[in-house]
Each structure stands twice: as structure tokens, then as C-alpha cells.
Amino acid sequence: MKSFPFFAVASILILAGMLAASGQTTPTLTINKTRVSLYGYVHVEGKGFTPQRNASSHLRKPDGTEYPVLPMLTNKRGELTHDIDTLLLPVGPHQLWIVDDTTHQSSNVVQFEVTNEQERSTRLTPILGR
């Protein structure tokens, strides 16, 4: 019976560790488009990061190389937003993921494709001569 307190304490510590680990959320990303024209934007939203800390954004080009890492700051809820201007990106599929610099956890990988297609515009074309 003398070993009972040891096992009780050990069980409580193991349970506390399991609960703490399950409380951590994996960072997740969403994007507003999976196909975007060369003259468009991709809106990125992330959540589940460490609040008010740095995160590192990684963007892989269609040829497999990666752009320089872009540091980002999360808000007090552990969220971030970013717009990617596709004007200077090469045509083809791009992969994006963001790593929480505090926990070193990586988000899911999202993919979008830059195309040569024109996006439909709602802008009015001026009529000449008026």
C-alpha cells in the first residue's frame, strides 16, 4: 500500500500531460481561391497560432524552389491574415504553409494555381467621345 501515493501522483501527472497536449491546436490556413489570374490576389487566413507572436510564411514556386521566408505577427487571438498579389508570381501551382515560431508547429499546406486566364471584371469600360 505504500506505493499507492506514487502511482496516484504518476497517474495524475500523466493525465495532466495528456490534457495539456490535447488543448494545443494545430495552426490552420484557408484561402479564398484555388485558381487565380496573373493579375489577382489570394486572401489567406490563419488561426490556431500562438497569440501575439511571430510566424514564418513559406511559399513554394511551381519549380519547387521557395521564396524567402516572410515573417508575420499574429493577433491576440492567434490569427493572421495576408493578401498575396499574384502579379509577379510565375504561372502554375504554388504551395503555402505557415510555421508557428513559438511551438514550431506547421499549418496545413494550401495550394493555389496562378493562371494566364483573365478574371471577370465588374468594372465599367468608359465610352470614348463622351
Image (tube, helix red, strand yellow):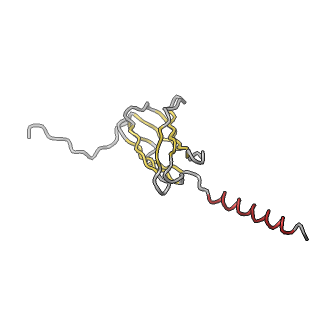
Name, please, the residue furthest toward the left.
130
Q: Which residue: 43% across, 36% down?
A: 114
Q: Is residue 29 above or below residue 61?
A: below
Image quarter in which the N terminus is found:
bottom right
Q: Is residue 16 above or below residue 126?
A: below
Give the image location of residue 11, x and y in percent: 79, 64
Give the image location of residue 17, x and y in percent: 71, 59
Q: Which residue: 41% across, 41% down?
A: 84
Give the image location of residue 16, x and y in percent: 70, 63
Q: Is residue 46 above or below residue 113?
A: below
Q: Is residue 36 above or below residue 76?
A: above
Q: Which residue: 48% across, 57% down?
A: 77
As drawn, is 31 to the left or to the right of 23? left
Q: How many marks?
A: 0
Frontmost residue, 60 versus 73: 73
Q: Which residue: 75% across, 62% down?
A: 13
Q: Quadrant of residue 14?
A: bottom right
Give the image location of residue 129, x and y in percent: 8, 37
As drawn, is 81 to the left or to the right of 95? left
Image quarter in which the C terminus is found:
top left
Name, please, the residue furthest toward the right.
1
